[in-house]
Image (cartoon, coloured by chain):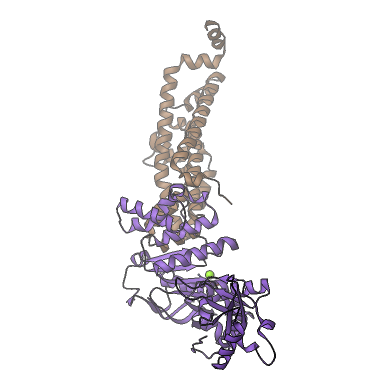
Amino acid sequence: MIRLEGVGKDFGDFTAVKELSLEIPEGKTCVMVGPSGCGKTTTMRMVNRLIEPTRGTVYINDEDFKKKKVEVLRRDIGYVIQEVGLFPHRTIAENISTTPKLAGWDDKKIKQRVDELLQLVELDPEENRNKFPRQLSGGQRQRVGLARAMAADPPVMLMDEPFAAVDPITRENLQNMFLRLQRKMKKTIIFVTHDINEAIKMGDQIAILKGGELVQADSPEELLANPKNQFVSDFIGEDRAIKILDLFSTDEVMWTEAPVLSRSNMEEETRNLIEKGEKAIPVIVEDEEGKKFWFDLDEIEGDVSINDVIRPLEITLEPTNSIKLAMARMLEHNNDAVLIKGDEGEEPGILTLKGIRNYVYRICESKPGEKVGI
Amino acid sequence: MEFLREILWQVAPIRYFFDNLSRITTYTQNHLELTLVGVVLAIILWVSVGIIIYRYPKLSHGVLGIASIVMCIPSIALYGILLTLPGFGLGRTSALTALILYAMLPIVRNVFIALRSVDPSILDAARGMGMSKQEVLWEVQIPNAMPTIFAGVRVALVMMVGIATLATYIGEQNLGRLIQHGITRTHPTMIIVGAVVVSIIAIGIDLLMGLLGKHLISKGLQLEESK
Ligand SMILES: Nc1ncnc2c1ncn2[C@@H]1O[C@H](COP(=O)(O)OP(=O)(O)O)[C@@H](O)[C@H]1O
Ligand SMILES: [Mg+2]
């Protein structure tokens, strides 16, 4: 856990960070985001005392960070920067060994750890361990930078725009790799970026800064649903509804109890459903060949027959896919629903365009702190 | 073979060289001794000064200014001045002092510039990982500054071989003696032999330093930066 209490920094007459208080729970990633010059880097560097705060203090796991010798404090905090800062005169293995060596590990243990870390960041140890930084690409260097920061298994990590200097495809690979790692490692992380999309993707918590002050700190969902003021909504952008699509997986929004009717006597079964008082639910229809169709019970009115509204259910997605992907597929195929595979032994679900529309709308309209169900 | 020897023997400097081999060997030994002792002392002294003015940049202006001025004093005059100082006089002390003073600019300046131009992000990462100031200096900064520092030492050393020649005027028995005597006796052959041997030593040392550099400078720094 990291807790900043009234932390601030003046450079001469200029106040870079006013008085910032923020708590990052154990194992969570807090992304600090804001326009250039708003004090993100300064705030982050105060945590490992590369910048001495003018006021306030920082608690790491409830211990005042001034209690330890500064070098010892830093050894327990992984540090990753945009420029990576690998030592060009040392091999990849030697670079990664930096903190274990400072901590006095024995050679055998260090060697094992280096290989383990290279595998973790998805680089072949055999091929890369004896190379020098100048022999690696930008993306590979940042992987090594990450491995070096994690070498002595610090519980806390600070990352200053770590993926900002690489091309978009490499960046996405690095982000995904990092998310996979973090799921296993559960480190407490402060991650700085100026890119709101990256913040939404990486953060459990997003802290928006402006002019050295904290404007809003919330989960990505809450932030998108309830931007605190005009500055935050401007920073998020006009497409917050689209950004929300990225945050939820299909299984969070899908309909799991849709009735499945057989094509041959769907009329009769539908009448039964209506008589039971069901309305406005998606209904799946399966024919003899196992082909699936669907319609919404709402659509059966007056002399509208099922055959007028029934349409194929052609697309199947995973429960872990984002609802954004589901939207994209529907648009591509001019469909308005997708089938979501059930986990082992479980019924499949159905995700409809109407369902997504309702869900996103209700999130956008929700009050601060309110939970939105399906 | 015999014939070739006959022809070479006709070339005066070669004959002079072989006729006076033992004397020239002694001169060469003295010459090398002076230069090498000079360079070792110069490295110890000027690298330290370079580090100090890097740590206290306020001093850098003054120190580098002095180094430039020293460089401008004609070497013969510098030997002359040292000669008159108490405790120096004729001999090794004055000769060494002069050589060390001439090495000041190339070494101090290169150390200073090299330390300053190490990529700040490398130092930031080093400090951020918990290296102490001393660890950052010796394990990160100096190794990275090595190519430039080494280039300075190389220039200084080659220059010292040349300037050591003039130490003959304050009593050094080195290759300068051949040139000095050649001039006073109007004996061009002696001058040529002296000059050629000094040049060969300078070139040889330069080549040797090139090889040494390959070993002393990390392989990682000798690689081309990939894009
Ligand atoms: N060492 C310094 N001296 C003076 N001003 C500084 C220093 N470091 C940062 N600043 C100023 O503090 C403000 C915040 O900087 P920084 O934290 O680097 O911003 P960010 O990382 O959000 O882009 C900027 O206006 C910057 O110019
Ligand atoms: Mg910054």
* Number of numbered discs overlaid on the protein picture: 0
Q: Considering only vertical position in the picture, is A190 above or below B193? A: below
- The chain drawn in purple is A
Task: Say which quarter of the image contains residue A351.
Answer: bottom right
Q: Which residue lies furthest to the top in this view?
A: B2
The N terminus of chain A is located in which quarter? bottom left
Chain B: what color?
A: brown
With respect to residue A341, does B152 lie above or below? above
Residue A199: give x, y in percent of width and height. 53, 73
Residue A5 rendering spot, x and y as whole percentages: 40, 81
A150 or A251, nearer to the observer = A251
Q: With B27 as the anchor, is A135 left or right in this view?
A: right
Q: Residue at x 39, y 34 (%)?
A: B92
| Residue under the point 38% across and 42% down | B86
* Image spot of residue A127 (x, y percent): 46, 47
Left/right of residue A288 with respect to residue B154 in the rendered view: right
Q: Does residue A195 appear anywhere in the picture? A: no
Which residue is nearer to you in this view: A11 or A44?
A44
Q: Considering depth in this image, is A290 or B41 the residue closer to the camera?
A: A290
Task: Find residue A326 and report its horizontal and vertical position in percent.
Answer: 59, 74
Looking at the image, residue A114 lies above or below residue A223? above
Q: In which quarter of the image is residue B42?
A: top left
Q: Does the rendering let one see residue B83?
A: yes
Q: Looking at this view, is A25 or B220 the one in front? A: A25
